[in-house]
Amino acid sequence: MEHLLFEHIEGYELFELRAFENLAGTSFSDYMVLSQVASHISSLSFDDCTQITDQIKLVANGEIHPKLKHFLELNSVKTLHCDKSLRNVLKALDIEHKHSPNITRGIKVNLKKILKKAMNKQLVLSASHVIAKENIKYDMEREDNVAISTGYAVDNLEEEIKNLKLKISKMVSWYFPQFGKTLESNSEILENILMNPNDISLNSEFEKHGKPELVKSLLKEMAQDIRNEDRDILFMTVQLINSKKRLYERLEGYLADKMKMLAPNLREILGDGLCYKIIHKAGGLLNLCLYPSSTVQLLGAEKALFISLKMKKRTPKYGLLYQLDYLKENQGRMCRYIAAKCSLAARIDYFGDERCNEYGKELRRLIDKKIKSYRSKTKIETSAEVIKKIHDKLKKDKLILKDGKETQ
């Protein structure tokens, strides 16, 4: 007697074969034709999603689940038609392996009729999700996606805070005419005044309005004149601004930590805010490494570049690099110079073994010297000299640290 084992997401189905496949390649998609060849004799079902994933992992590693082993022994299986993935496992159990793809395909088509029930869709979905999640490995090379998303979240929060401040500015100026602008920039103090006007704490910005005691008494009187409805709306808006500010500070710190790990040298030249935008425009840190400095220079100005090429006009000299704070004069020449240093820093960050920002610091100093050299016409070091100097310094520090550990 020969058997056929059919595997599906909910378990295994065992069939007794009355006839076998021939060279003609007969189709068994019709249920009546299939029933003449194979008859269903037993089932092995899994109880939950964990058992399903365990079974899949064991089969992938060339092992067999104890429940499946017991199931085959209980049915006295000696010759088994099944998938090729179980060949090595069956050899260890002294079971002959055979393969009948046409009959297996026919069982797959008619499984619902054979079992007389539909598949558990929730179990199938859960198992698929778990398997997909385990198969997707965390890729350090795509860490830049997290930094880019965080960077745009920081920018969006900053814009939202500005919009909220604009919305309450008129209300604050109406109820606190003398202190409108000061309170708009000190939302924490405004929240304290609205919540507890009897206990007001001020900072140095209120000194220009007079003595602290006089300012406190004025603020207390003004706060008491606010209608309850306006007070509630104003208080909720100020609370929202303060909560967004706290989230903004946390995200800003998180972005700085991510950029220190992802591109420590590049961020020294561009800063966190511009660094993630350049990486995003390039399509990742790896792409940024592969770009020549002329392409890095024009990132963010693609539309202007294509228009100029189409209209046969002068091409733009800079893109996102124009946003740098320290770039005030000689923008065209300096953008070209900075782009070359950014390209170099990005390659060090991506291909370098050590995560340090020493190269970025020196390249930033070199940029500052270049800006000053346009006025004084002094000669500055080349990038190769700076890179070699930092490399030798890091190598020397590493050897000193290693010798120190050995002596200890």
Image (spheres, rainbow, N blue to C red):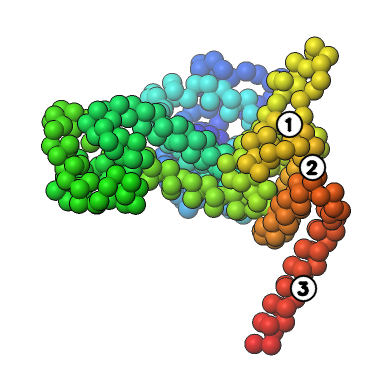
Residue 163 in the image, given as x and y percentages of width and height: 39, 28
Q: Inspect the image, locate mark 3, and give the three-letter code of the amino acid beneath it.
A: Lys
Which picture quadrant has residue 404? bottom right
Residue 380 visible from this viewpoint: yes
Q: Residue at x 75, y 46 (%)?
A: 371
Residue 197 in the image, given as x and y percentages of width and height: 16, 45
Label 2 vs label 3: CA separation?
30 Å
Image disc number at residue 34 = none
Mark 2 Cα shell of 10 Å, populated few (<14), some (14-19), many (≥20): some
Looking at the rendered structure, the number of numbered marks drawn on it comes to 3
Callout 1: helix, strand or loop? loop
Q: Which residue is mark 1?
A: 318
Q: Inspect the image, locate mark 1, and give the three-letter code of the amino acid beneath it.
A: Tyr
Q: Which residue is mark 2?
A: 337
Q: Is residue 240 left or right of residue 146?
A: left
Q: Is residue 136 above or below residue 227?
A: below
Front residue of 383 and 40: 383
Front residue of 392 and 87: 392
Q: Which residue is mark 3?
A: 396
Q: Residue at x 43, y 43 (%)?
A: 248
